[in-house]
Amino acid sequence: MKKDVTYFETINEDHSLETFALAEQRAAEAGITKIILASTTGQTALKAMHYFAGKGITLVVIPHQYGFSSEDNRFPADIVQTLQESGHKVHFGTMLFHTEKLYGSGIPSIIADFLRCFSEGVKVCYEITLMAADAGLVKAGEAVIAIAGTGKNADTALLMRAATTRNIRKLCVDEILCKPYIRRD
């Protein structure tokens, strides 16, 4: 089997619409109806909601958990309401690769650092897919597309088979649709 991968040469510009287009095309080909999307402030979620409107896609939006970087969550309640009224899901769960204080173990940080070797977005795609499965918003083994990115942009999309954290070894990346081309000098 031969598949194309899109590599973005820059990480500072917004590649969200191109990432959404790649996800839309692959979702249609594979019969995928759920896209798991990372969104910190809700802006990427709104952009995705408008982009995928009427296309048979349900967004499962995963913002930062409450208290992650401040006492107030940066994802506004009115955007949660807008997404939910449009048939999408929003889940504020524990960010799995940021639990070292909870469990007293550095393993979550080691996993996160390893995945960041591919890109920040790859790390987040793993994390949000596990979170969505743990919340029952996607089924274990279900084919989904996870979208995340670097900074404020969606620049990474993976076709994945979801799994819960209890069965993390069953989490599988079937395809890389796009990611930044990272040069480390």
Image (cartoon, helix red, strand yellow):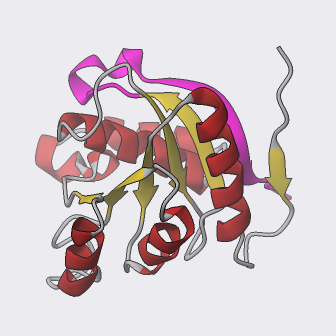
Residue at 39%, 25% (x, y): give it.
142
Q: What residue sits 38% from the left and 44% below the top?
A: 127
- Look at the image and tell me in which quarter the N terminus lies: top right
Of 13 and 107, nearer the camera is 13
Which residues make up the magenta segment? Answer: 162-185
Q: Quadrant of the C terminus?
A: bottom right
Question: Can you give x and y, in whole percent of width and height, for residue 38 in the image?
Answer: 43, 60
Give left or right: position of 11 versus 41: right
Residue 59's place in the image compared with 65, above or below, is: above
Q: Which residue sits at x=23%, y=38%?
A: 105
Identify whether 118 is placed above or below 140. Answer: below
Residue 31 is a magenta residue: no
**Residue 175 lies within the magenta run:** yes
Give the x, y percent position of residue 182: 79, 55
Tell me which residue sits at (31%, 65%) in the image.
Answer: 63
**Picture coordinates of residue 95, whole percent (x, y):** 27, 53
Give the camera-side residue of 52 and 94: 52
In the visual, does 42 lie left or right of 183? left
Image spot of residue 103 (x, y percent): 14, 41
Comparing 57 with 178, the one in front is: 57
User: Can residue 142 be seen in this snapshot?
Assistant: yes
